[in-house]
Image (spheres, grey):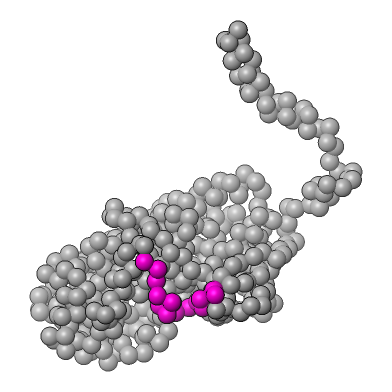
Amino acid sequence: MKKIVLAYSGGLDTSVIISWLKETYNVEVIAMAADVGQGEELEPLQEKALQSGASKLYIEDVRDEFMRDFVFPLLKSGALYEQKYLLGTAIARPVIAKRLVEIAAKEGADAIAHGATGKGNDQVRFELTVKALAPQLKIVAPWREWKIRSREDAIDYAAKRGIPVPVTKAKPYSMDRNLWHVSYEGGILEDPNVEPEKDMFLLTKDPADAPDIPEYVEIGFVQGIPVSVNGETLAPVSLLTTLNTIAGRHGVGRVDMVENRLVGIKSRGIYETPGGTLLYYAHRELEALTLDRETAHFKEMAAVKYGELVYYGLWYTPLREALDAFFNSTQRNVTGTVRLKLYKGNVIVAGRSSDNSLYREDLATFGADDVYNQRDAEGFINLFGLPLKVQGMMNKHCKE
């Protein structure tokens, strides 16, 4: 190998990796940081990457692509992993790896590297994307090769070489941030019986300290894609940023869970997904108005599989593309608005409307109506329950 493009975040692992790659392989290292909404984290990276030994740094703004081609398809699917995780880290990895491959092609590199550990999911997500898009590239995963065995070891390695890192032994948990969420894991959080510190959270206020007065927010959708907040049409990045602010001040969107990693290890992760939580709630309520029963129920089953594909790093696969085609077809009538009430960590649906609504008050009413003949239900129940009646007759006969 002569030239390696490294997926660079400026965190502990990737800062150390630049130096390690040069020492171990005697190669040129080009760093690539994908802007998926980390905010101020990107500002010091240029100087830091060069100080750590990179020949150059690319900072690639992929926020629009991330929202359009990854977050919105995820939202339309309604997928969660293990019923709780809104897949914030997982959905960002394929767009980052895609841009990594593109920079490698531009630079004529023959390998890519990443800072994912050998115990986690991200190694799979990065490498499966590279295999799908550029199978000729070599992949270097230092955590599977070097003698560093812990974050404490990595901190010591950095200190000896004068590499600036944002993590200390006193506060060793790691964070991953993008437009969709912030995740926290490792260090003091590895004990699932320990409550996280109050000041750890970046996006959401502690629900106990949230306003005592509820706030209402209205979200508009067109064919399953959110397009407006409180009547104002917004571009995807601005829309999510706005919802993050609104939901965050009410403490909405925190998840603390023990999950099953793909490699077979259980891990404890804490996630903040304030705006995403509002979008999931609103989208689901709008689908309840506009999707027929059979499609809605089948979609719930398909969403479980979709969530697994995203979590496992299987984004660039025929099955994911086929499921997207299905989900897109279900969204043709998912247009309308949903009003949510936010109060101290809670999201309460306050109203929903759509021109494509399948809900009919004249059918649902408990009052008098001229649409539904209740006598028809007797024949339906007789036919629907016929197998049960036959089973019951057989059981009665056997007992006699």
Is 199 a magenta residue?
yes
| Residue displayed at 13% across by 86% down | 161
In the rendered view, does 296 fall on the left or right side of 144? right
In the rendered view, does 192 fall on the left or right side of 117? right
Is 340 a magenta residue?
no
Quarter of the figure with residue 382: top right
Please identify the dominant SS of the magenta region: loop
Q: Is residue 57 visible?
A: yes
| Residue displayed at 14% across by 80% down | 157
In the rendered view, does 324 fall on the left or right side of 231? left
Residue 272 spot, x, y in % from top left? 46, 71
| Residue displayed at 44% across by 57% down | 81
Q: Is residue 127 visible?
A: no
Q: Quadrant of the N terminus?
A: bottom left
Name the one closer to the observer, 65 or 75: 75
Residue 218 spot, x, y in % from top left? 67, 72
Name the one closer to the observer, 378 or 159: 159
Name the one closer to the observer, 387 or 185: 185
Is 127 rendered above or below residue 67? Answer: above
Magenta region, residue range: 194-208
Residue 140 spot, x, y in % from top left? 19, 68
Quarter of the figure with residue 286: bottom right
